Amino acid sequence: MLKKYFPFYKAGAMSMMAYKFNIFSWFFISILQWICLVFLWLSIYKSSENGINSVINGFTFQEMIVYIILINISSFTMFISDTFDQISDEIKDGTIAISFIRPISYRGRFIAQVLGTVSASFLILGLPSLTVALLLFKFLGFLTYSSLAHFFASIIFFFFSMIFAVLLNDSINFLLGTVCFYTMQAFGLNQMRQVVVGFLSGAFVPISFFPGIFGKIVNFLPFAGLAQNPVLILQGKTTLFQSTLILGKNILWFAVFELFCALSFYTASKKITVQGG
């Protein structure tokens, strides 16, 4: 049964391979942005009470630098789902009609595509970049693990947490994509999605910096599992029990959002208006 989705997985991987020069270009540009962030946080810590030795909301300066680099690498190489844009384009040009007569799941097709795209991106950029970053930070003493077992456990839990983070992120994109069945417009909604998800996932600043009850609410939401929590696992800032909870939470939220996706698509597909041919 899964064989019929393999062509979509392969197409996703091949599309990433075809545009790998653009990906490398954007990656090197992003490195310049990361350097700017490092200097920004250096200024913040230097201006604090204890200077560079300060601990701000549970992060030392070294831990914050590791967090910034790891979260940007993982986000850049693994959150590259274009499900939202594809749904919007198919509604606009009318090709969405073909999807209703194909003997495959519309949602399953996007899952296969995003897994293929992310697999290629991870092998091309993610794995080498994370390996270099971990080795460098370990050499500089920015990373400390309680034991070798803790180190390997962190990598394993990070890997599986990121798999479900990728799937959860794609579920969110698909769910919002079904809104385009009603609005016929996507640009504003897509911009809002990027800002909200980026902010609430801890991609901009750790959620521990959010004030009081708001931070606790955000930690409960699924967005923390997209970026911050897997990176905290990789940093070794979580215990085995906490890592298990993070992975379990991502799996649970993915299942919940898949249910919402199925209901939303079922409802929206009955009201679709094809604008194309």
Image (spheres, rainbow, N blue to C red):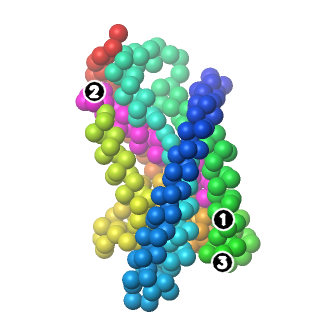
User: Which residue appears farthest toward the right when viewing the image?
Assistant: 148
> Is 169 situated left or right of 114 in this image?
left
Q: Is residue 251 visible?
A: no
Q: Which residue, given by chain and number where applicable, does mark 3 sit on? A: 141
Amino acid beneath label 1: Leu
Does 161 appear in magenta? yes
Measured as percent of width and height from the top left, residue 88 is found at: 36, 28
Among the two numbered marks 1 and 2 on one chain, the one whose residue lies closer to the N terminus: 1
| Residue drawn at 58 percent across, 30 percent down | 15
| Residue drawn at 37 percent across, 16 percent down | 94
* Residue range (magenta): 157-185
The image shows residue 118, relative to residue 85, as above or below, that is below
| Residue drawn at 67 percent across, 68 percent down | 136
Amino acid beneath label 2: Met
Nearer the observer: mark 2 or 3; the answer is 3
Among the two numbered marks 1 and 3 on one chain, the one whose residue lies closer to the N terminus: 1
Numbered disc 3: secondary structure: loop
Residue count near mark 1 (Cα–Cα under 10 Å), binned few <14, some 14–19, many ≥20: some
Q: Which residue, given by chain and number where applicable, does mark 1 sit on? A: 134
Numbered disc 2: secondary structure: loop
Cα separation between marks 1 and 2: 44 Å
The tag on residue 203 is: none
